[in-house]
Image (tube, rainbow, N blue to C red):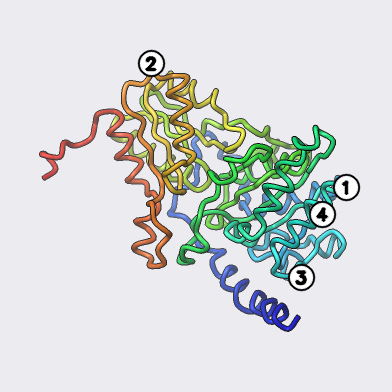
Amino acid sequence: MLGIARRKVGLGLFRAPILQERLHRVLPAGSVLSKKYSTSAKEIQVREALNSALDEEMSADPKVFLMGEEVGEYQGAYKISKGLLEKYGPERVLDTPITEAGFAGIGVGAAYYGLRPIVEFMTFNFSMQAIDHIINSAAKSNYMSAGQISVPIVFRGPNGAAAGVGAQHSQCYAAWYAHVPGLKVLTPYSSEDARGLLKAAIRDPDPVVFLENELLYGESFPVSAEALDSSFCLPIGKAKIEREGKDVTITAFSKMVGYALQAADVLSAEGISAEVINLRSIRPLDRATINASVRKTNRLVTVEEGFPQHGVGAEICMSVVEESFEYLDAPVERIAGADVPMPYSANLERMAVPQVDDIVRAAKRACYRAVPLAAAA
């Protein structure tokens, strides 16, 4: 018990303030704006969008409850659960010890009995402690029970690289969880994504892995009046074309959507029209939208933060090869994180994560507009 108490003190006095200090770090200016948003729309932060979605779904359904480390008294390491403990009380906003396997298992058991738990991991790297419950207890139960057991649970929290947190806190788990039958895997980018997809995840009868991004929490996006309505919900499994184009298709998810949009601006200045697809959902994957775009542009660049081998881009590539191979005018270009554990050093960390220039170069290669090596020498 003393050991647990010491770890709890460590969480409250060390880990959470460090995480909170990174709340205000943002992406480069202009990295998050979509050309399709109305300038008259209200701007809200991704953090606020997630908070409002939680609040409205908890208000609408008394079976919905939130549990995790520091979600109550501290109001969340990233302040996603701000105000919820005061409004709904400790029976529906539960602070847990640092025992991911324990509280994830409790959440799955509660879902078996008809409740709708939302389990927050302070980072998805810590979900490795609970992966047996996520995979074996949640994902497989509906199939193995011949549909008699429904598991309406959401596992959510920040995923992927943040800033200076080392290999153990910087991994992208999109491909990991998308590999598993029985799970749905969502990856919001904008405030509209965060709000609409989280509502859909909470209402869904199946277990959902909801991968947020720490560096996007403080970003503001325009949100329409429709998206601010309490009934708003986005369909799971449907991608969004953030920017239309005719020369090359760029697929991305989470933070990389902003980078893809920046790359599209650079390419446009050089006469290349890029279509940017925000995947939103990794499992199920919107293969129809991806293939329709590739059949129009005849070229494809996939972008992701995760490791390249067996990644999301590899699955997209295979889908296009299977369904639209005859439409391709160039090899598929795949941009991913470096195939190494994430370095702690800031300069090495930047080299290990895809950058805008990487996307631009890949798109130029696909369009046969790359500078020949002899000319660059």
Circles 4 and 3 in contact, beta carbons < 8 Å: no
- Sooner in the amino-acid sequence: mark 3 or mark 1: 3
Query: Is the C terminus in the top left, top right, bottom left or bottom right quadrant?
Result: top left
User: In 3D space, how far apart are the residues under numbered discs 4 and 3 (Cα atoms)?
Assistant: 15 Å
**Could you tell me which secondary element the residue under label 2 belongs to?**
helix
- Sooner in the amino-acid sequence: mark 4 or mark 3: 4
Give the side of residue 211 with respect to residue 2, left or right: left
**Looking at numbered disc 1 in the image, what kind of residue is underneath it?**
Tyr
Q: Picture quarter containing residue 261?
A: top left
Residue closest to the eye, 158 or 259: 158
Q: Picture quarter containing residue 232?
A: top right
- Sooner in the amino-acid sequence: mark 1 or mark 4: 4
Where is residue 113? Give x, y as percent: 88, 47
Q: Residue at x 11, y 39 (%)?
A: 375
**Looking at numbered disc 3 in the image, what kind of residue is underneath it?**
Glu
- Which residue is denoted by mark 4 in the rendering? 65
236 above or below 211? above
**Looking at numbered disc 2 in the image, what kind of residue is underneath it?**
Glu
Which circle, 4 or 2, is nearer the viewer?
A: 2
User: In 3D space, how far apart are the residues under numbered discs 1 and 4 (Cα atoms)?
Assistant: 13 Å
Residue closest to the eye, 103 or 95: 103
- Which residue is denoted by mark 3 in the rendering? 73
Mark 4 neighbour density, 10 Å: few (under 14) some (14–19) many (20 or more): many
**Could you tell me which secondary element the residue under label 4 belongs to?**
strand
Where is residue 307? Give x, y as percent: 44, 48
- Which residue is denoted by mark 2 in the rendering? 326
